[in-house]
Structures are given as C-alpha cells and as structure tokens.
Image (spheres, rainbow, N blue to C red):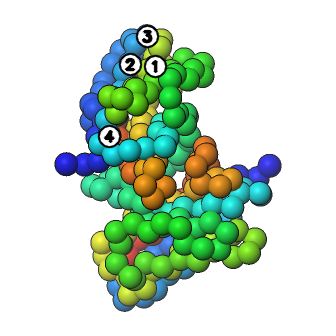
C-alpha cells in the first residue's frame, strides 16, 4: 500500500509569487490535513479536508488556501509569498480524521 | 498559555536509561497522539490514546483523562531513539489537532 505522497519535495520561489503543493493520501483515506513546520514555531495546523469539504482551519492568513478533490488528493496554495512562508509543509492522511495519522515526507519551500 | 504543553523541551540521556516525556493539555479531548520525527523531517505516528495505556515494543504511552496528562516512556533507550517526540491533542469541540512544541531527545552511546 503506497504511503502519503507529497510533491514537489523541494521548491524555491521569490517573494510575491504563488505556489501550489500537492498531497496524495493513502488509498481509502478521506481526511487530509496540512501543517507548516518552522524551527521556531514547531508544527502549526493549517487546515483539514474531509470528503472535499474543509472541516477545520488554523490561524493562518487568507493567502493560504486549499482544496480536496473527489479522489481525496489535496492541494495547498499560498499566494503572494513572503519570506516568512519558508518552511516544511507536511500533509497527513487518515481514514476519517480521528484515527492514526500517516504523514508524507513534506515539501520544503524556500522563499527568496 | 498553550493548550498543549510538553516537557522537557530537551532531554539528553545515556543508552539504556528509562525515558519519560510528558504532555499536559487544558482542553477537552477525544484522543491524544504521540508522534516521532527523525532528522530529515519524516513523522511517524506512534500511538493514539483515548484512555489507559498502550505498549509497542520498548515504547509505552499512558493517559490520565481526569488529570489531563499523558506520558510517553521509552525503556532500555538506544541511540536510534534520538528524535523529536511530539504530542497532539484532538479537541472534542471542533476535532482540531493541537500540537505540543516537541521534546528533542538525544540518547548517547
């Protein structure tokens, strides 16, 4: 059974650009959640999707958005990138959201 | 005050020692997760608890719902246990996961 796949693995962007990150959950999992991890802030919850609906949202500005498709794959978009958006972005999937989480390897985003 | 607090923040021990990492939370929860993150980023889920105690190999996780406290224990610690251990509480009000800041564990041979 394939694990959670995140693409791309690394990304370099400049300020003001936008970026889209992708997460393919484990087959059969319907919940996908996204997290930002920085050395100073630890893991911060961005949002969670379940069956194409955003079920929860963390305290991030509106520049951070996401969506989930009918096959449960999810994308996260960050518009008007700022230097402070440089971080490791992780997604996790689970069957319905309350069970054991399975994490992808993350996308390391650098904003120059 | 953070809703989920871990202690200690950093822990260095000798191989073979018994390790305890603590997690306290202030909100009503439906479950508590313990996860392990090795250098390089990969996060692995270790336990999900809603009551009592769970054991997997040398790892033991306990939770006391009344005291709003959970512990992760490692018996006969080994250098390969060196990692960041993170607890996360699933709030029963909105199902959101609240993350602890993590405990960086180093086991010296």
Q: Are marks 2 and 1 in contact (CB under 8 Å)?
A: yes
Q: Nearer the viewer, mark 2 or mark 3?
A: 2
Q: Nearer the viewer, mark 3 or mark 4?
A: 4
SS class, disc 2: strand
**Residue at label 2?**
B19
Q: Residue at x 67, y 69 (%)?
A: A51
Have a look at marks 3 and 4 and say if they share a chain. yes
Residue A52 position within the rendered picture, expressed as x and y whole percent measured from the top left: 65, 74
User: Label 4 to label 2, Cα distance in Å?
Assistant: 20 Å
Q: Residue at x 27, y 31 (%)?
A: B8
Subunit that carries the residue with mark 4: B
Sort mark 1 into few (<14), some (14-19) or many (20+) by Cα contacts within 10 Å.
many
Q: Horizontally, is A51 left or right of B55 in the view?
A: right
**Residue at label 3?**
B16
Residue B19 position within the rendered picture, expressed as x and y whole percent measured from the top left: 38, 18
**Residue at label 4?**
B25
Subunit that carries the residue with mark 2: B
Q: Is residue B5 above or below residue A3?
A: above
SS class, disc 3: loop
Residue B58 position within the rendered picture, expressed as x and y whole percent measured from the top left: 54, 17
Q: Nearer the viewer, mark 1 or mark 4?
A: 4
**Residue nearest the viewer, comparing A11 with B35:** B35
User: Label 3 to label 1, Cα distance in Å?
Assistant: 9 Å
User: Label 2 to label 1, Cα distance in Å?
Assistant: 5 Å
Can residue A5 be spotted in the picture?
no
């Amino acid at each position: 059974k394939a694990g959670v796949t995140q693409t791309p693995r690394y990304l370099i962007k400049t300020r003001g650009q936008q970026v889209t990150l992708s997460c393919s959950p484990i087959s059969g999992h319907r919940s996908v959640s996204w997290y930002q991890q920085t050395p100073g802030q630890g893991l911060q919850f961005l949002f969670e999707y379940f069956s194409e609906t955003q079920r929860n949202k963390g305290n991030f500005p509106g520049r951070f958005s996401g969506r989930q498709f009918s096959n449960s794959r999810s994308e996260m978009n960050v518009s008007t990138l700022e230097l402070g958006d440089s971080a490791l972005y992780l997604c996790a999937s689970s069957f319905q959201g309350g069970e054991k989480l399975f994490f992808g390897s993350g996308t390391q985003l650098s904003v120059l | 005050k953070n809703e989920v607090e871990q202690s200690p923040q950093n822990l260095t021990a000798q191989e073979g020692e018994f390790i305890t990492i603590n997690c306290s939370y202030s909100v009503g929860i439906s479950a508590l997760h313990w996860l392990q993150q090795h250098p390089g980023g990969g996060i692995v889920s270790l336990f999900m608890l809603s009551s009592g105690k769970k054991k997997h190999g040398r790892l033991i996780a306990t939770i006391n719902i009344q005291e709003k406290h959970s512990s992760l224990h490692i018996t006969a610690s080994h250098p390969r246990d060196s990692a960041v251990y993170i607890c996360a509480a699933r709030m029963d009000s909105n199902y959101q996961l609240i993350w602890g800041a993590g405990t960086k564990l180093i086991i010296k041979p």
